[in-house]
Image: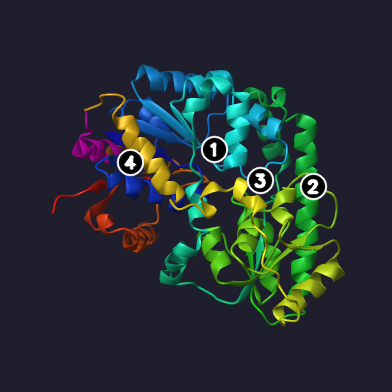
Amino acid sequence: MNLYIHIEVLKREFQSKLLIAMETASRGIKVYMGRLESYIMRDFFEPGIILHKSISPSPHRINELREYKKKNFIVTSLDEEVGLVNKDSKWYLKLRYSKESIDLTDKIFTWGKFDYDNLTKNFKSFKKKFVLSGNPRVDFWRKDFEFFFKKKKPLYKNYILFSYNFYLTSKKEFAEQSKYLKKTKYVRRGLSINLHKKIDKDNSRMYKEFSKLVMALSKETNLLIIVRPHPMDKLKHYDFLSNYKNVKVINEGSISEWIHYAKIVVHSGCTGGLEASVRGRPTISYLPFNSVHGHPLCDKFSIKTKNLKQCLNAIKKVAKNKTRIKKPDLNSFKLRAYNLFSNKPGYKVIADEFVKLTKTKEIQNQNNDLILKFKFKARDIRSKFLKLKYGNFKFSIFNKNDTLNTFKILKKLNPEFKNLKLNFIKKDIIQIKKISN
């Protein structure tokens, strides 16, 4: 059987989904990973198991799920955006799930017991569809994954990392986003246009406050400052920081890698900040005003500051080792991230479920990879001739060197991974399969 893992945001999802792909491929299932959604809908691929990043009940997604079932696919989902840090349990369920979307899905993987209990309580008739697995993104937060970052060659070490979860939008972009919220019926499920306006306003205000902080800090420290923008933000919004010699704005690589080599992490209600504090990095939360843009849970284990002077002093004290960093009490957080301390990491739990699913439905047809490559090559030539833009800001193409390097490092996790091979089917689609000895 084939497994299809769709990727929406490459920097956010690549490493964790590659883990799932490698573990599943080692069990004898051929895996395709990348921008797959549209090609599956157009019958480029034979039926198999699909892992989606969400099953939000928008008209488009519901129609898509119906088509998958008609085409004899097994549909699974792990929501990449909710279930970990959301304070209002009912709100995120209304936004991201419905009885219809769950009915059209075979298995739904959850972040932790909080997420699992929330879903099983509110959708009791579908309880058997929910799996307490954890998200493999959290696998990289575990101590047994320290080896991965040590094998990666960092560009810098011992820097102050700013992890941003806010971004700027133009009037045109805001109008397009509002149109999308109406089209997908998010406005009916809780994300009103007024709330969207408030988030956008707070994003802009937070951008200004953090810009002041970075500029002030650059004058008071010799340490390198790395600014990590939100994936949706444009680098041109940070051109003004080029005037500061010890500041670099970088959006390449995963946030987990940047956290590993950071001396201090600064954020505001950001998941990157939560990850940093959970992994034992000195973490400072800057909360200059009451904002709706972030998640309060992400600030839980951070040193909290509320104005520019206070934040600068906190950063300088930590940098000079004058502040004792307490080890966070993660007992309550275990409910949110199941696989942080579990015996079996999340990627293995998910792969176990995929193997079980192969036994529930007979799907024997395999893809002809030579024909696939020919079709995709023809499309690439056409796109080049027509000067069509490849991909988008969330995911354009796989970086070949980085992809192969990550694949090589992760092979050290399991002796069974030595027999795996990675092929580039298309610029934005890779295949992982088990090869015979």
Which amino acid lies under the numbered mark 2 shown in the image of this protein? Answer: Asp
Please give the range of residues in magenta: 365-377
Q: Earlier in the sequence, mark 4 or mark 2?
A: 4
Could you give the CA–CA distance between mark 3 and mark 4, rounded to whole angstroms?
30 Å
* Residue 424 vertical position relative to residue 414 in the rendered view, above or below: above
The residue singled out by tag 4 in the image is 32
Which of the image's four quarters has the N terminus?
top left
The residue singled out by tag 3 in the image is 85
The residue singled out by tag 2 in the image is 202
Disc nearest the viewer among 3 and 4:
3
Could you give the CA–CA distance between mark 2 and mark 3, rounded to whole angstroms?
19 Å
Disc nearest the viewer among 1 and 2:
1
The residue singled out by tag 1 in the image is 79
Asked whether the beta carbons under mark 4 and mark 2 sit within 8 Å of each other, the answer is no
- Residue 138 is situated, as x and y percent measured from the top left of the image, at 52, 53
Which amino acid lies under the numbered mark 3 shown in the image of this protein? Answer: Val
* Residue 245 vertical position relative to residue 333 in the rendered view, above or below: below
- Residue 84 is situated, as x and y percent measured from the top left of the image, at 62, 44
Task: Bin the neighbour count of mark 3 within 10 Å (Cα to Cα): few under 14, some 14-19, many 20 and up.
Answer: many
